[in-house]
């Protein structure tokens, strides 16, 4: 049974991730490329066309880890990353479903996806909005801890709201939702950035909207896949 659930989650997540890769290529990659021009001060990383000029910058780039070039390499790498992320997120939703005994079906799959969107995107974005290259940010480890904690707290709140009707449960859910934001997300040392504010705002809005589609597709596809490959997953 677990194997069939895992297969359903992988298929659903990969399908959603491939679509998300297309959305990123069309809506977000151009914004990232534009921001990178501000990050580098508008200087190109290209060197002399004849290849005879060896500079310190060139040696530095050679020493760096390989990164996909702009164009098809970047698109392929981004799409593959989104497919893996989709599979992981779908597996997490399926695991939560099994642990709680709350089934994911064709009828409620989109609700599960939107709950994932609220927990993993909307709640963290209230303190750590999607960032472009070159934008100031706080300590990486502190941001990661706060991000994970916010997702867990918001997920627990959504579970209480979905399964309990007692006043104490609602009060506890509100506490869980507010706690990460009372603590506050790690702030950057400075807010000075070369990235124009309108570009940053456009990217954040598009990133959040893209994730809404991404998580909705994960829920829908997961409900369909579980119905097809793991019909007895919740049988007692």
Image: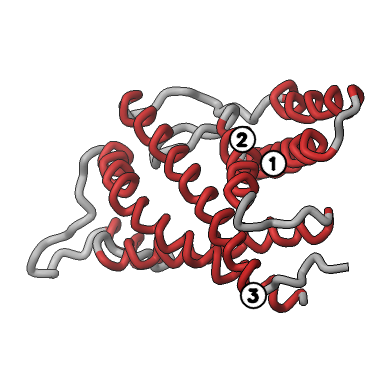
Alpha carbon distance from label 2 to label 1 = 7 Å
Residue bearing mark 1: 151
Circle 3 — which element? helix
Distance from the alpha carbon under mark 3 to that under mark 1: 29 Å
Q: In the rendered image, which quarter is residue 210 located in?
A: top left
* Whole-number angstrom distance, CA of label 3 to CA of label 2: 33 Å
Task: Say which quadrant the C terminus sits in.
Answer: bottom right
Residue 44 in sight = yes
Contact (Cβ within 8 Å) of mark 3 with mark 1: no
Q: Which residue is mark 2?
A: 124
Q: Which residue is mark 3?
A: 229
- Residue 225 percent across, percent down from the top left: 59, 68
- Looking at the rendered image, the disc whose residue lies closer to the viewer, 3 or 2, is 3
Decide which of 1, 56 is in the foreground and name it.
1
Question: Which residue corresponds to the image point at 49% horizontal and 42% vertical from the top-left?
Answer: 212
Q: Secondary structure at mark 2?
A: helix
Instruction: Locate residue 157, reporting x and y percent.
Output: 78, 35
Farthest-out residue, left: 50
First of labels 2, 1 by sequence position: 2
* Picture residue at 54% right of the left edge, 49% below the top: 215
- Asked whether the residues under the numbered discs 2 and 1 touch, taking CB atoms below 8 Å apart as contact, a structural biologist would say yes
Q: How many marks?
A: 3
- Mark 3 vs mark 1: in front: 3
Residue 64 appears in the figure: no
């Amino acid at each position: 049974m677990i194997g069939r659930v895992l297969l359903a989650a992988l298929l659903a997540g990969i399908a959603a991730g491939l679509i998300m890769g297309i959305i990123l290529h069309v809506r977000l990659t151009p914004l990232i490329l534009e921001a990178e021009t501000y990050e580098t001060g508008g200087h190109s990383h290209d060197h002399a066309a004849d290849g005879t000029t060896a500079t310190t910058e060139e040696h530095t780039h050679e020493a760096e880890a390989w990164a996909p070039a702009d164009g098809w390499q970047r698109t392929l790498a981004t799409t593959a990353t989104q497919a893996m992320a989709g599979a992981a997120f779908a597996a997490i939703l399926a695991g939560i479903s099994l642990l709680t005994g709350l089934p994911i079906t064709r009828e409620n799959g989109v609700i599960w996806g939107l709950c994932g969107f609220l927990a993993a995107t909307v709640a963290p974005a209230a303190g750590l909005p999607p960032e472009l290259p070159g934008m100031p940010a706080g300590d990486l480890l502190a941001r990661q801890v706060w991000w994970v904690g916010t997702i867990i707290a918001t997920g627990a709140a959504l579970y209480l709201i979905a399964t309990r009707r007692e006043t104490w449960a609602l009060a506890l859910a509100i506490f869980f939702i507010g706690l990460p934001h009372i603590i506050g997300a790690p702030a950057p040392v400075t807010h000075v950035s070369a990235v124009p504010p309108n570009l940053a705002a456009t990217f954040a809005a598009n990133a959040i909207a893209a994730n809404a589609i991404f998580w909705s597709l994960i829920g829908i596809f997961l409900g369909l896949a579980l119905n097809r490959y793991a019909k007895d997953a919740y049988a007692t």
